Image (cartoon, rainbow, N blue to C red):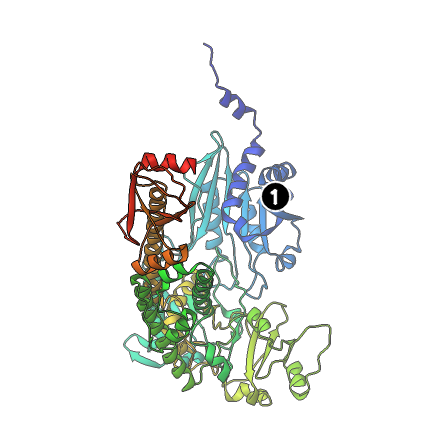
Amino acid sequence: MVNFLSFEDIILELMDDVEVSAKAFNQVIDEFFTERQIIFDIVYFKSFDNLTELIDSILKQSNGNFSYALSSYDENLPNYLYFMQSAIFFLYSCNDIFSLHTSVELTNLSPKELKFLVFIQNCSLKELENSIDRLVERNELNSDRGYIEVFEYLLIDDENLIHLASIEWFTELACNQIQLVVLNTFDKNNQKWREDLENYEKFQNFYGCHLKMFLYENSTTCWERIEKTQDGLIPAGLKFDVFEIISKIANYSPDYNFNDSNFDIVFNIFNKRSILNTLTHMTTSFIESREIVVTTLGEPYTSYEKLWLPFDDATWMFLIFTFFIGFSSIFIIYRLNNFIQIGIFGSNIKTPSLNIVGTFFGIPQLKVPTNHIPRFLLIMFVFFCLIIRTCYQSKLFEFMTSTPRRSPPQTIQELKDNDFRIFFVQDYNDIEDLIEDEKMNWPQTYPISYAVYNKIFIYQSHNATAKIGLIIDEPSWKNFKKIGSEKFGFKIDWQTIPNYYLAVGQSGFLFNANNFFFHIFDETVQKLIPSGIMAQLLQNCFPFEVKSKSKKDAIVLSIEDLDFGFIIWLGCCAVCAACFVGEIFIWIFWRTLEQMQSQKCPTKVKFAKVCPVNTAMQSMEQKNSENLNIFRIQKLNLDSDGLQTDSNIEYDIYCIFGKKVEILKIEDEIDEFKFQSHMKNT
């Protein structure tokens, strides 16, 4: 019996297994890591098969979407992993997971955010589950330990299948237990994933699990009150309510305690200690690099700046554009003939530009256009100016009777843009030296700008990334040494301040907690900031003011606030423009029709003896004649048959259309044929 193979089957059989694995690998990289612009450190174990061929095939198919630095596994791996950005591990078998786990036992002091991808050869799902279970049994993977395992995703090469998996603590089946979750599977035979490959979001739902939360006792001053219940001490108040809101969104039930060391998450937001005690988690990044800026109130606006403050820049530009269009239209119309000017403005309007300025300032119009379209347009413009003028006067009165302030900078870049002085220091002694030097002489190697009211320190810790910035107003400048004891309530230990200790402003507000909560907490609390909860949360726990919408903030009017008036004005302008264009077309149509009719003479021609032409023209103006054509001919005498005589008498012929107008006495009347033949002879 003969087996017939299709062309696709032949190609699949000929393709190397390495190329198929590289295809699946690249698809995972493109979907999960390309947007992060990661440079991978590739770490391989010595026994890995066909590593060079696999990496070459990956690079050929990647289209340059990812770059790497290749490193071999050795005993010094923990040291340079400490400074890695992200890494890809190539393991020969499931047993190599033990060596990898030992190598990446890092603490939260690592200066960078790590993203790990593990590719395992010669391993099945069952074998990997057994390996993870053995780690758990040996207490090497436990949520209470301070170690970090960041296996973001795992690719498991299991004969004809490649499994995309992840190690998670919380699943629908178990709470706070390590589970190997298979996200998708790649079939090497047909080279397709069983489901569409998508970026799987982790930890969006905790499936109703009960989480034990530990609250440091030395941070209880940041709670409004501590209530004693049968279950122990429970925090209460507005600050605690924020955590309750988050727990409902994240779908978990919190159990709070102050003394039990067995916990799932630490709420240590306002703790002044090092982050070494932060609980870590296996499957997520363990550090978030954040810039921290705590600001005072912004600088107040001057009296001249308040004149421009009621509207934002876009609104001012729209107003300028509106008046520019109005004055330009008047200039163009004035360049046309008098007939069009009178048709648009009316015969009684002599200064339309001055009328526009007067209308804007509320001066009543003494002369209103006689035509209906300009009159309607004037009424709508008066209504538009009333809205704008009222809004401007009310906001200006508000700003003149208050002290609006500029919004304080919220990021390091904004501080640079606003000419703040920036200093990088290593310890508290450097700050003391800067304070004593009031002239603030600084090396020219670092560009600095001088501000009048504000100064900023950016603390740079020993790991070269942790920063905390303090903007201090002028009165507090010389007393900066006392800030630690008087305002913070503790002595500043510049060596142990964490790099995500507290974030105010656009950075949001961070929890010194198990890191997989960041994706939920940061997004949720950001939604609470506009409601003013942020300011109330920090008022008793931090000495500086934070940005919030208060009565002193300069809330200017934008186009969105004035869209009703703008829409009415634009709608009226559109209606008037349409009517004006229609009237012009009608006028052109009638003028064209009249010119076509004026080219024809009537069948009977009035042949009148008149005075000189100027007298006849004066008579026509007195009679208000219309559609009158004057033909000057020689002096004629006509007999009874309409033939020319020798008499030399001046005549004017009037071809009158539309209506009969008598200028002078009609002396004779001839038919059209005789008149035309007579004119030819003449």
Q: Looking at the picture, how far across and down is residue 54, in whole percent?
A: 61, 38
* Quadrant location of the C terminus in the rendered image: top left
Q: What crowding class fits label 1: few (fewer than 14 Cα within 10 Å), some (14-19), or many (20 or more)?
A: few
Quarter residue 553 falls in:
bottom left
Which residue sits furthest left? 660
- Could you say where residue 329 lies in the image, as x and y percent from the top left? 44, 62
Q: For the view shown, which residue lies furthest in the right direction?
A: 444
Can you name the residue that lies furthest to the top here? 1
Asked if one can make out residue 173 in the rendered structure from this viewpoint, the answer is no
Please state which of residues 411 and 330 is positioned toward the viewer in this rendering: 330
Front residue of 315 and 265: 315
Q: Position of residue 660 (x, y in %)?
A: 26, 49
Q: Callout 1: helix, strand or loop?
A: loop
In the picture, measured across the screen, residue 507 lies left or right of residue 600, that is right
In the displayed structure, would residue 163 be above or below residue 169?
Answer: above
- Residue ID for mark 1: 64
Say if residue 527 shows up in the picture.
yes
**Which residue is drawn at the image coordinates 34% and 62% (left, top)?**
567
Residue sitting at x 47%, y 14%: 4
Q: Quadrant of residue 535?
A: bottom left
The amino acid at mark 1 is: Gly
Examine the rendered structure and indicate whether residue 586 appears above or below residue 379: above
Left or right of residue 468, residue 218 in this image: left
Looking at the rendering, which quadrant does residue 83 occupy?
bottom right
How many numbered callouts? 1
Residue 610: x and y in percent read 35, 52
Q: From this viewpoint, which residue is outermost toward the front?
A: 646
